[in-house]
Amino acid sequence: MPKRTIVATGKSGARSKAWQNSGMSDDRAAPLDLSRAKRVLVTKLRHHGDVLLVSPVFSLLKARAPHLEIDALIYAETADMISLHPAVSQVHMIDREWKKRGVAVQGAKEWQLLRAMDKRHYDLIVHLTEHPRGAWLSQILRPRWSVAPQHDRALWKRCFSHVYPIPRHTPRHTVESNLDALRRLGIIPTEAEKKLVLVPGKAADDKIDDMLRQANVQRGKFIHIHPTSRWFFKTWPAERVADLILELGKAGHRVVLSAAPAQNERAMITAIKERLKAPVVDFTGMLSLKELAALTSRARLFIGVDSAPMHMAAAVGTPTVALFGPSGEHQWGPWGVPHRLVTSDHPCRPCGNDGCGGSKVSECLTTLPVERVLAAANELLAAG
């Protein structure tokens, strides 16, 4: 397998025939012959969980064509989601901080990134969003093939050799939607090939083993609760999380808490701990994303809301209880792992809004009773 590199900038000469022979006209409707391809670029310019849910695309391409070099284009902050994926060769990154450094700096960084991608001479671009960058990359890099979801933007179809439909009225899990890009190219996955992949790495594994040892917590003998999300309209109230921890403690279960270092997430963890009658192991703000994945992989059960850590729990194979409010569990639920979904009976959900009336408070979550979440956890604990 080619050596993996992380690329944010690079240098290369322009391709002399870039605008003269795209190869699109002959291949627009044909299934893809991967034996004719050497390098593939997969783009997903979204958030952490979105990027993780692309991992089966890399695996499937590599399984069907082991000779392929498969690169990714993502935002820099999401790199931990795929940086050790065994099928990924290079990771090109867009740093959102570039724009804060001025037009000149941003322009220079973007140009260097474009030259680095041009140097790779991609035969296929798999663009997995409706982000306009994918369209102009397909035109500038001129791969033999390119595939993207359908879009009504002017000239969109002319930028790609293949486009595929996105179901608008029937829920479809995001993993399946991502794989639709390859289905459009004639690459049909088996169920085994749809598995999420997330590799924490030795450094993260070693750190978590040491932290658990110092906290006197045994591997496979604790429940990991990550109650926060960067979007607080997706969270369950702190007092209910605390009541859940108390009930789990009565049954003899140890709980390990985690959250991001953001001030609002720290404040929620503090509010939870203030309601508890005994200390709880708390790793809030101490873990990288790789370390968070390593922690979850050692848990007996994960409990959380619709968030990247929930997807990470599924990726490392930990049974998961997921609370869903305004977001859709059919599109975003735990993938490929034993799980229980806890939702309310509100007929208006999933609405996709940032809280009821834009209030940042989702009543379909705040009204979820502790008993329902506890019952879901007990079902998975009994099954394990």
Image: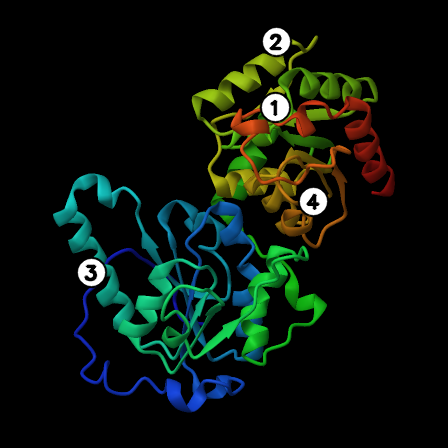
**Which of the image's four quarters has the C terminus?**
top right
- Mark 2 is surrounded, within 10 Å at the Cα level, by few (under 14), some (14 to 19) or many (20 or more) other residues, namely some
Tags 3 and 4 in contact by the CB under 8 Å rule? no
Q: Nearer the viewer, residue 137 or 356?
A: 356
Return the residue at label 2.
274
Residue 48: x and y, percent? 48, 46
What distance separates the C-alpha of mark 3 from that of mark 4? 40 Å
What distance separates the C-alpha of mark 2 from that of mark 3? 50 Å
Quarter residue 140 falls in: bottom left
Label drawn at residue 215 = 1
On the rendered structure, is 159 left or right of 219? left
Return the residue at label 3.
112
Judged from the image, the secondary structure of the residue bearing numbered disc 2 is helix
Considering only order in the chain, which callout, 4 or 3, is on the residue closer to the N terminus? Answer: 3
Who's the residue at 34% across and 61% down the image?
Answer: 133
Considering only order in the chain, which callout, 3 or 1, is on the residue closer to the N terminus? Answer: 3
Considering only order in the chain, which callout, 2 or 1, is on the residue closer to the N terminus? Answer: 1
What distance separates the C-alpha of mark 2 from that of mark 4? 28 Å
